[in-house]
Amino acid sequence: MEITFEHVTHSYDANSPMANLGLDDVSLKIDDKKFTAIVGQTGSGKSTLVRHINALLKPTSGKLTVGDRVITSETNNKNLKPLRKKVGMVFQFPESQLFEETVEKDIMFGPMNFGFSESDAKDAAHEMIELVGLSKDYLQKSPFDLSGGQMRRVAIAGVLASNPETIILDEPTAGLDPVGRHEIMDLFKNLQSKGRTIILITHNMDDVANYADEMAVMSQGKLVASGLPSDVFNNQDLLKNDLLTLPQSAQFAQSLAQKYFQFNKLPITIDELSAEIKQQVNGD
Amino acid sequence: MNKLIMGRYLPGDSLIYQLDPRGKFLLTFYFVGIVFLANNVASYVFLMAFVLFAVYLSKINFGFFIKGLRPIFWLILFTVLLQLFFTPSSHPIWHWGFLTLSKEGMVIASYIFVRFVLIIFISTLLTLTTTPIEISDSIESILKPLKKVNFPVTQVALMLSIALRFVPLLVDETTKIMDAQRARGVDFGEGGLIKRIKSFVPILIPLFVSSFSIAYDLAIAMESRGYKDGEGRSKYRVLKWSKRDNITVLVMLAVTIILLFIRSY
């Protein structure tokens, strides 16, 4: 689904002396079927931004369009289910949302709320548990008997089970081990290739470089940059003002550039980096 | 969830903020007590004038006090209506079945209303100008004499400050879990009563689970930093009783005397 923010401002505690701007006049277009990464320091408004997409928050002013739905400050709280079915959201530390007696029931919870029949929901649970890398044996266990990483996978399965068109991920890999992180990120990339729109909030610039098609940079409630990762990571203003850090490959290239090497544009992935080095070494 | 004004501190700096929290705490309770001494129009007007003066001194926007009334609006309305229509009288203005409207009923109803407003305003004043931690420090200080009878004052104070400290945290956690379940298609406040009650299970269970894990982590963190309660612990926040606190007590005494005078007048 295409998502368009038009001059969206969101103020927390509006009409009180403690009012503060969560979002300040953000205009952004998130393309259909693309993998978009949103980065920015803690408190920069990333989570506030994505919570608008399934109307958990509504703009104080401005409007956004999600597929064919328009959300403004006047949007009614009723009848949001169709929107929330289309926009799945994996929150930070989603394992805290588990509550059912068994893993199977917990994964079925979302689909059942969205009107799946019991047998369809069950099928979805059986499909999703394997998709997130756990065996079907886990379905009958209590979610509270699992390890943290396994709980995370179950929670993600619970969101994916409703078959959303757009998937929002708020730091889905925070606190996971490197192997688990790659598995989860590959899973999302895979879902994108099956036609889903993915929106990822992250602090990990390597994930942005390796997985994202587009990126947006937030700072203090404002959108400060957006575009292709290869362009954004070459934006010197952002780097100078500490609004962005570089992926490892780009950092490596920067160090190389101090001696012998020259890069017109910093490579951001390992593949790009090695190709550049190869070319420059052989080329001379 | 954020609409609750009572029990919410508002940063600021005015005379009321600078008063010793122990004095503020005790005098608030004292004032709530003497509100019940008022028995005629003049005495209620006098108490209202005093409270409004205190509110003025706090330099806090009056709107916050009005908001403080909101959570118990229905309770006030119910009590006032009850007094209004059920006060027995020999000269009813209006009469229908078991309902009676009379002059006495109206007077009592308005007294009750003013009483509610006074109590809410003064306690809102306390909580808006005093941090929860100051309140728990005051309670510890006030309870100190009970140590003589082996009452565990420090433990109680610690429990209290931990509880207070974790209220905002749990509110955040609740909001977060509610959002997560909403994203999974839960509609809070929709459907019949049973359905509504059921929709809270997906919030309560995660909330209990995370509260227990937070409590466990906190206990470990405190032990690893060598926490031991009881004798010899010095205070980080020292409460200081000053001249203006003496003056406040004197003002409150004067209010009591004037009130007693108006009452018997």
Image: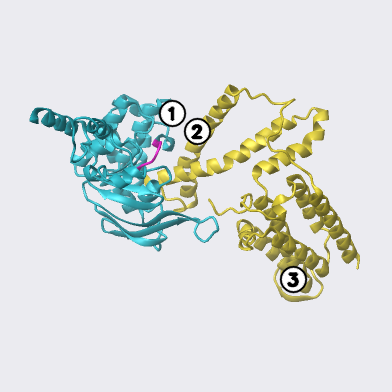
Q: Amino acid at mark 2?
A: Val
Q: Which residue is mark 3?
A: B106
**In the depicted view, which residue is nearer to us: A14 or A218?**
A218
Q: Do labels 1 and 2 touch, CB within 8 Å?
A: yes
**In the depicted view, which residue is nearer to us: A234 or B254?**
A234
Give the SS element for disc 1. helix
- The answer to which image quadrant residue B239 occupies is top right
Q: Do labels 3 and 2 touch, CB within 8 Å?
A: no
Which disc number belongs to residue B209?
Answer: 2
Disc 3 crowd, CA 10 A, few/some/many (<14, 14-19, 20+): some
Output the chain of dot 3: B
**Residue A92 colored magenta?**
yes
Q: Colour of chain B?
A: yellow
Q: Colour of chain A?
A: cyan
Which disc number belongs to residue B43?
Answer: none
Q: Amino acid at mark 1?
A: Phe
Work out which residue is located at the far left of the displayed protein and give it. A283
Q: Which residues are magenta?
A: A89-94
Q: Are marks 3 and 2 on the same chain?
A: yes
Give the SS element for disc 2. helix
Q: Is residue B18 left or right of residue B70?
A: right
